[in-house]
Image (spheres, grey):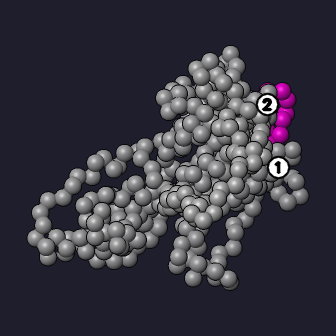
Amino acid sequence: MKRSALSLHATRMAALALALTSLAGCDTLNDWFASDRVDYKSTASAPPLAVPSDLSTSPTDQRYVAPPANLALGGATARNVTAAGNASEGQPTAQDPLGMHIERDGDRRWLVVDGRSPEQLWPQLQEFWQENGFALKTDAASTGIMTTDWAENRANIPDDWFRRTVGKLIDFAYSSGTRDSFRTLVSRGPNGTTDISITHSAMEEVLTGQDKTSSRWEERPRDPALEALFLAKLMQKFGLTEAQSKQLLTDARPAAAPATIEQNAGASTLDLQESFDRAWLRVGLALDRTNFTVDNRDREKGIYYVRYADSMQELKREGLFGKLFYSGNSARKPGQEFLVNVRAKGDSVTQVAVLNANGQIDTSSDAQRIVSLLHSQLN
């Protein structure tokens, strides 16, 4: 594993302490590399408030009692009890006895929740990411886009004896040298369902220079296993057990249709052999798999507003030094925006095109590149 300069410095301090104190031996790492081990939380719960001895507690007013656990936030519709005994957020059906299922397209998976709207699930999604240690960078219920800030998985740092003792005083010096961010897309599906996808983005700090004293951030590939892990955690948030969520991931239903490139007067478009509802979701997932970020979307018009994303610059701006050096006029301006249009050509065919500012099909090389990228992702 590559480590940051600070992490390298902390390791050298540990080695020096070992030499000075003549201590021998150390604990093993206890499988800290496990792919399903995550710890993004940085704060602990506060202790309960104590009532001073000279004061008496007031009787509890039932108007302010928290709702039962089987109620959604805001007193929404009660959760449904499944045949297996779960208080499920989804509506159980013959096809989905747990009220939800997983669909997949290649190595991409998304959760389909039956009988619930995006508006009903949104508050729980906010809670979900906060409970898992993330701050929300984008929280746009109107467009169904939710993104987290960059965060470090502290479980990736070895918990050796030095860090558990002396290292706690300088824990800030320890770093896994990686940062993660997640994008959640929430879409209204057919027949009263809601589709929820989670996309992972990652950066890694690589040591550079002959003496390895400097570093730079580089993009890492997205981790489908980590996306699946958070989908499993989300299903558990919605009322399933760990075993049930893992089984739904294993039984993911394939949902793929071929995409073909159509040429017309120098412009390239895509044809998808499926309905608008399914094509709308798959195009959004395909855009997430590229270096284009969905800033906004309008389902009624069938338009995704996207721009080329430079994750390294974003991470630099969000870090401690980024706030000092990437602010004001020195901040890099957002990249050019593109309009990706999804429209039905019939009951079972959907066209995907890149439009210009006038609403016409864009024939520029950049637009054709986006079409080619979508074609490769959708096949």
Query: Looking at the image, which residue is at 47% across and 64% down?
Result: 218
Task: Give, as a three-letter code, the residue at label 2.
Answer: Gly
Please state the horizontal and vertical placement of residue 299, each as a whole percent of the image: 82, 45
**In this rendering, position of residue 317 left or right of residue 168:** right
Point out the residue furthest to the top here: 94
**In this rendering, position of residue 339 left or right of residue 222:** right
Tell me if residue 181 is in the magenta stretch: no
Query: Looking at the image, which residue is at 73% across and 65% down?
Result: 336
Work out whether 224 lies above or below 152.
Answer: above
In the picture, which quadrant includes the C terminus? top right
Mark number for residue 192? 2
- Earlier in the chain: of badge 2 and badge 1, it is 2
Span colored in magenta: 341-353
Q: Residues within 10 Å of mark 1 (few under 14, many from 20)?
A: few
Query: Looking at the image, which residue is at 64% across and 50% down?
Result: 127
Please state the horizontal and vertical placement of residue 31, each as a whole percent of the image: 30, 47
Residue 250 in sight in this render: no
Q: Secondary structure at mark 2?
A: helix
Q: Which residue is mark 1?
A: 298
Work out whether 222 lies above or below 228.
Answer: below
